């Protein structure tokens, strides 16, 4: 069964502006709804709510539905009122008659577009200057290659007491700088290749098992971090007010749009966590007012910031975060503002 990117991502739209309304606006009908192939969480919410963007509150009010992303086609949702709150329950449509048939594997409605962010869940990463400069580095290649790739062996300076058999090769990339203070927030470590340790030593010998680009002398190695990240979290607004900026866009993209990955200048130290959703605003320009009075001439007029989209943080570091552009209603640019909804 195919749900597509709209299904993958649509739950994020529940977290746009003003989603935290105090009162749920309940539709009088229907009393129940059976999920069908192609449904989205937003669409299902709209069966019971006048404003589908309040869907998050509806799911939270219903303890029987522990995970909204584990609702499947042919499940039936039942609506009722209890203690002044809308309650949902659901029943599985189970056929008891034994028979054999061929069908597509059922998939639950997805919460986030994993295909858009999967390559950024582990690599690249953001490090400080000491972490990168003190890491082991490539000093040469077996068989006198100038560069190396998958299947080649490399010599690496000083891995005498290995902490793992698996190492990832990185190359220093962009320097992330705060647009407000010009302070360095971190250094991009670009993913180059995965390796396995063949022989410890100084130099050590490692074999390249997978590469995204050629390996060069001077590239740095760090212990591989292959821990899986939980992807079944609910997007939600930060509990505190956070205001930042988009300072970079990953993967060599010049135009920022939906499903692009951006870097924002706020991270764990600022209170951002995985799943936090922020609004994107185009910063209003300062324009000349040719009709201003003599006393006001030269002051300029600051235009208001305009809502341009929504980002969801999926990988926060200490001072910066990777975020997915979940919704883009206008053109998005570097240095556009991000803010708690």
Image (cartoon, helix red, strand yellow):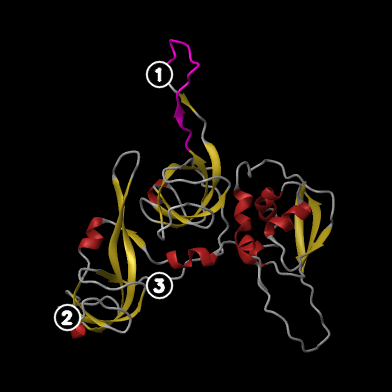
The percent coordinates of residue 240 (x first, y second) are: 49, 42
Q: Who's the residue at 27% across and 75% down the image?
A: 163
Residue underneath mark 1: 298
Counting labels gives: 3
Residue 97 in which image quadrant: bottom right
Q: Is residue 286 left or right of residue 161?
A: right
The answer to which quarter of the image holds residue 194 is bottom left
Instruction: Give the side of residue 111 with respect to residue 33, left or right.
Output: left
Residue at 72% in and 55% down = 45
| Mark earlier in primary sequence (2, 3) | 2
**Element at badge 3?**
loop
Residue 79 locus on image (x, y percent): 80, 56
Q: Residue furthest left?
A: 202
Single out the residue that lies furthest toward the top. 294
Label 2 to label 1: alpha-carbon separation: 68 Å
Q: What segment carries the magenta color?
A: 283-298
Task: Compare marks 2 and 1 and give the one earlier in the sequence.
Answer: 2
Q: Which residue is mark 2?
A: 201
Q: Residue at x 30, y 77 (%)?
A: 164
Q: Between residues 171 and 98, which one lies in front from this camera angle?
A: 171
In the rendered image, residue 51, in percent from the top left (x then y), is placed at 72, 46
Assess whether residue 257 is covered by the magenta stretch.
no
Query: Which mark is in front, 1 or 3?
Result: 1
Seen in the picture, residue 183 relative to 6 is either above or below; the reply is above
Which quadrant of the view contains residue 73?
A: bottom right
Task: Depth check: give the residue in front, 252 or 57.
Answer: 252
Badge 1: residue crowd in 10 Å (few <14, some 14–19, many ≥20) = few
Could you say where residue 269 lies in the image, as x and y percent from the top left?
38, 49
Helix, strand or loop for disc 2 = loop
Residue at label 3?
Answer: 226
Tell me which secondary structure the magenta stretch mostly adopts.
Answer: loop
């Amino acid at each position: 069964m195919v749900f597509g990117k709209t299904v993958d991502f649509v739950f994020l739209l529940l977290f746009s502006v003003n989603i935290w309304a105090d009162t749920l606006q309940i539709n009088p009908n229907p009393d129940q709804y059976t999920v069908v192939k192609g449904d989205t969480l937003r669409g299902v919410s709209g069966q019971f709510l006048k404003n589908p963007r309040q869907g998050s509150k509806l799911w939270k009010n219903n303890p029987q539905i522990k995970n909204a992303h584990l609702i499947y086609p042919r499940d039936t949702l039942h609506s009722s009122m209890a203690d002044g709150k809308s309650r949902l329950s659901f029943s599985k449509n189970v056929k008891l008659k034994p028979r054999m048939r061929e069908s597509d594997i059922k998939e639950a409605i997805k919460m986030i577009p994993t295909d858009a962010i999967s390559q950024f869940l582990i690599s690249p990463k953001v490090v400080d200057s000491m972490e990168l400069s003190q890491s082991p580095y490539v000093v040469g290649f077996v068989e006198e290659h100038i560069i190396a790739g998958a299947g080649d062996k490399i010599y690496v300076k000083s891995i005498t007491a290995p902490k793992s058999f698996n190492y990832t090769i990185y190359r220093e990339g962009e320097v992330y700088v705060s647009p407000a203070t010009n302070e360095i927030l971190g250094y991009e470590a670009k993913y180059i290749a995965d390796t396995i340790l063949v022989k410890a030593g100084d130099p050590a010998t490692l074999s390249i098992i997978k590469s995204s680009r050629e390996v060069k002398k001077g590239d740095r190695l760090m212990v591989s971090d292959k821990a899986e990240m939980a992807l079944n979290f609910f997007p939600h607004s930060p509990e505190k007010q956070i205001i930042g900026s988009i300072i970079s866009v990953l993967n060599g993209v010049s135009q920022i749009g939906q499903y692009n990955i951006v870097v924002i200048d706020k991270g764990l130290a600022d209170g951002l966590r995985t799943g936090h959703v922020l609004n994107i605003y185009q910063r209003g320009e300062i324009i000349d007012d040719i009709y201003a009075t003599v006393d006001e001439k030269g002051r300029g007029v600051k235009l208001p910031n305009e809502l341009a989209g929504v980002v969801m943080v999926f990988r926060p570091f200490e001072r910066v975060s990777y975020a997915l552009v979940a919704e883009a209603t206008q053109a998005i640019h570097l240095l556009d503002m991000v803010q708690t909804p």
